[in-house]
Image (tube, rainbow, N blue to C red):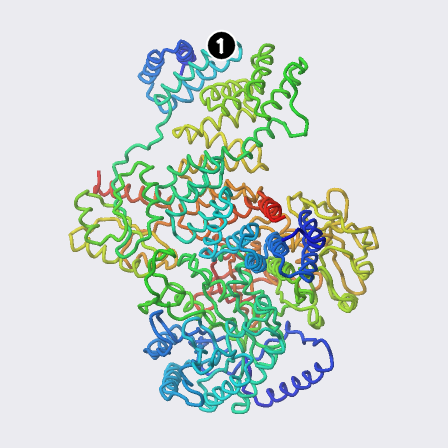
Amino acid sequence: MPTRDKDARKRRDEARAARAAKAKSAPKKKKAPQAPKAPERPVAKVAEPPGKRTASARNPLFPIGVNYYPLEAETQSWDDWYDRDVASEFAAMAEARMSLVRIFISWKLFEPQVGQYSDDAEDRLSGIMDAARDNKLQLIVTFFADDRLAELLEVPWGKKRDARTDQYLLQRETSLIQRIVNKYRSDPVVFAWDLGNEAFLSGFKTQPQLEAWVDTMREAVREVDPDRPILFSVDPETMFRHTGVDPRDAIDKGEIAVSHATAAYRAYASEGPVISGPSTYVDGFLLHSAARDLPVLMDDIGMLSLDHSVAEESAHVRTVLYTGLMNRASGVLLRRFCDLDTERREPYFRDPFEVLVGLVDVDGEDKPVMNEVETFARVAAWVDFKEYTLVPERTAVLIPGERYEPLPNLAGLYDPRACLEAYMFAKEAQLPVSVAREEDEFGAFSVLVVPSAFNLTDETWERLASFVQSGGALIYSYGGGEAHPAVRDLFGVEFLGDGGAVDSLTCRVAQQDVLGTLEPFDSTLSLPHFALLGHGGGTVVATDAKGNPLLVANQHGQGRAVFIATPVERALAQGDPWAAPAEVKAMMQTVYGAVASAAGCGAQIECDIPEVEVALFNGEGDDIVLLLNHSPEAVTANLVFERAVASISDVRGGTPSQIGAVGLGVALEPNGAASLRIVYA
Amino acid sequence: MSDDASARLYQALVNQDAAAAISVIEQVRGASSDTGTLFESLFAPAMSLLGGAWAAGTIDEYTFTQAAVVAEQIGSFVMPSSTAQDTGVTVLLGTMHRDHHSIDRNIIAAALKEAGHRVIDLGADVRPAEFLERLDETGARIVIVCAQMMATARSILRVREMFLTGGVDDAVILVSGGPFAADKTLARTVGANGVISGAESALKLVSRAARDLRKAGRIS
Amino acid sequence: MTGRSQQVALAEGLARQGHIQPAVEACYQALRIDDADPLVHCLLAHLMLEGDFYDEAIEAATRAIEIDPDCSPAYLALGLAYDRRGGMWDQSILVWHELAEVVPDLVTAHVQLGEAFSAAAFDEEAIDAWRKALELDPHKARAMYNLAIAALRKEGVATALPGFRKAGELDPSQDDFFFALAGIKDDGNPAPDPEDVEEDRESRLEAAGALAFEEDFFSAAEVIRWIFDEDHDDADALALSAYLYIKQEAINEAMACALRALSINKRTRTAIYCLGVTFSKRPGLNEHAARVFGALAKSSPDEPIPHVLHAEALLGLQKFSRAETAYQTAIRLDPACVRARFGLAAVFFTEGRHAEAMWEIRRAAYHDTRRQGLFWDLYDAYTEGSA
């Protein structure tokens, strides 16, 4: 989260302005790497209790919050905007250790006629501010949102004009923003100004339109409030997927970025049960994808359909919350505070009384998912980011630039799935991993993974060669078609052609221990391409059953490049992730893990269960280890540390258990999490 | 079991003499206390002999077919019963008041019936008073209450309260439904003795509860 | 519509060969020429569906239908996209209704309609749809599986299990497994006439197997009799006889032959299979069936069907968690095993894991509909009708 240090902000703004000026003359912007640098976080607003190590009630550097919608029942009208006992609900949020609440302005209520603002609306907003202040909560104020119910933007005098592009409406929007911002510009209750939510912003048809609108609204805010962070709540990957509009440049103008997995994106990238497989990794993938050089708020955490049981809902929310904490989110926002009280319907859905997915039910009773949030908040409170830092991510999955090509180029459809699959392999190999884009600087990384890309630019190939030459490691899986000429020198292979589709993947290990301990296998797997390779100097580590090279490792300069002859990531992503051949997954995990280890950024803690994600926070005298079980089965994760562990205890306190060894086992419930304080011998 | 008995059964089948076949079976049953293996030790060898005779040409196709018909007739004498023996345990089952979810309840009820328990399915939307009424009427001491919504799951507490008010303090209440899987403490909060997570767990828990109740002399 | 343009024909040709990227490019070229050609949008929808890009498939199919509301292949693509994507059951129901009216004998439309109804909790309507599907095609296994699941949800596993087994018998993969055990493969050559079979045991056994494969049971029986005339203690021949009797619903005869075969050679896998099948037809012999199929699964670990058969026997014994393990093994071996998917769904329902159960049913539908290749049938009929 941004600092309150004005000098630091000034330096950053100057740097950003300089970059923007440069970008106007250059066709592409290269983003500074995000991986090793922790985003700046705000100074604590919550006083720490004195004395012995104790957690504050909330973690000021990892706020937990919730979206608080204006209406709580379908039968309510648009002018019932927050017309309820906000104070008691805010008290409940505070009791659950939340510290952040997003509210949504109703333009329709605030400006019922042009230029005339409703006192009642302003009073209600004032009441909300007071209630937040009283409960030590902070607010994210969202100006332009579409919540499908409260008609927030449907000003009667708007005459159905498009609020995104109509100049007259833009002027009125500016006035609205300035009126509200002006009133609260020095009120510490406001955490950030949010220009709009994804439902509204998805209506932009082109990138210039979006950027123009963002610029206008930002200026409107800045004219009145020069300091407070501004965000707008779109995830760059999901928005591009749904609309074809790339919001990255617009996001970069803000101080905070946002990630969230929409229902449509889940259906595209990780369809299936929410408690196993890709569904449990997609949030982390999007979080890393959204993190460029801004802190990222992980937004909209919660169920997106009514198909799941209460237990599945709890498991899913737990998984996503811990994913955020373990993957460098700067805070989390849950989807909805209270279930929406809906009209009684025919049994069109399973429940006779259909509800949307809040933390409390329509009667105000906590649901089990609220317990999850409270438990998580207690854990998060103990992870003091001033004392503990997450191990930097030196491995990155590269999203190719072709991902942004429109149809008929299918790369934009295949690549994100392949990248998610690669991200999962890296996670299952226990690697701290991030996501980068083709145009990003590679310098911050030690290992790059390019999964099943169809094409990279010539410039990228040069940069990759230079990256490896300088000591980096590259894992590249052939994506089909003609191989780039750079492949020959970089990977030490002679590309002889695309062997076409095959129905099986076989592996015979030629050189053991070059890429870890590989096992031979014969597996049924549909692969769309298989590169036929001649020897070009690289070490053939494994072949298929007929002797065609499958894995080739080549020393290039000071670094190493590994060529995988077939688009494994794409094949598994396109297939049934729950029926992916275990031996193929094991091969990929082994290769990723071995390359990263050799590059000095392998798993810090070994774990024998690939589905258990491990995050290590290094401290001065001790470390914190968080474990997350991505599978719906109970497991015991056997961990092996680099040095002997003297004792472990729950991060929240409790009697330490003496260990005196490098290894220990941790029992995890289905989709369970564990948070341990490790003291070394 | 002697080969002789199998041979006699085989002969009875070949002779299309169902009565003789039954007689052989009854003799074997009478002579041995271990009747659970009649199929493996008597029927299967006899059928093997039948198959061999057909293959050898000792019996023709017609005789083979007719023998098979007789085998079908006497099958119920030698095959284990497809229905489980009555355990004597009565189980009351219902979905809590204001809750209409039935699928899990139907599956659990069917599994318990299949296992030989006496299941009284009260259906959906069952008030606590009705549970008590049927408990008194049937003498059941095992009650399974299903709920799929948080509100109805919490209200199961009223069932225990109703039972206590009615002087029933020894009933075993087992609960089932998503809310109990999500919140591990909820079952205890509502006064339940256990959580059923599916048909298989229902079978295990009911058997255990029945065993404990029998030991305590609460059920026969 | 006057016929397909060259560009459309090119796109179609590429699509039929499964060259997705070039076909998509050709479609876009065709759209530049004429963006109001429903065939192109239809092809695009199909291509997107092949890649599991459901939103794009929905967009393209919707466009095709806007241009021509009678474009039946577009309805098919649209309905499948909705169903595979999930969460769009209300739209899906409308589409399948429409398609069932436009192409009334399209069995899949009724099966999919039933599944959409079921997902939207219209259980009675779902059952009606599946029954309608069976009226049109009594061998439609997926309709039967769905009805078995519906029975499970009302009346438990014992009621559902016969439905699973009956549906399983309609599935050729079970017979394929038997023939795989017997070493009989479809090599493109017809089975020999019994009179032309050479007089040695091996040739006769091979010929009998080939005739059985072609479902010429009487000729097969005739040849087997010749084997018995030379040696009536031939375990393989007895096992093949057992199979023939099973196919003719003569279970006791089959049991007799299988038992005899195993008394001669207890390792005869074809006999083990036949014995297991006969046991599975007798509810009281579930335990025996489980033992036999368990042994068969151990001896054929890389074949999905024995694991499925083992799982079904375990279902009959209410050993649900072991059945789950067996079904999972089968699915790992063959993700497209519809029978295993439905079986696993049944197990999940017994454990209250509804979302996972519905997912398995969706995956079964996915693989089943992909296998059927219905799009091109409807596409050809549509283009012929409009030519």
In percent of the image, x 49 and y 12: which residue is there? Answer: B61
Nearest the eye: C16 or C292: C16
In the picture, which quadrant includes the N terminus of chain A?
Answer: bottom right
Q: Pick the residue in front: A200 or A187.
A: A200
Binning the other alpha carbons within 10 Å of mark 1 as few (below 14), some (14 to 19) or many (20 upward) gives few
Q: Is residue C341 above or below residue B160?
A: above
Answer whether residue A274 is visible to the viewer in this image: yes
The image position of residue A574, as x and y in percent, is 61, 53
Question: On the image, which quarter does residue A130 sit in?
Answer: bottom left
- Disc 1 on helix, strand or loop? loop
* Rendered view: A288 above or below C359: below
Q: Chain of mark 1?
A: B
Residue at (35%, 70%) from the top-left corner? A73
Q: Position of residue C72 (x, y in %)?
A: 55, 50
Residue placed under numbered mark 1 in the picture: B60
Residue A50 appearing in the image: no
Amino acid on which the number 1 mark rests in the picture: Asp
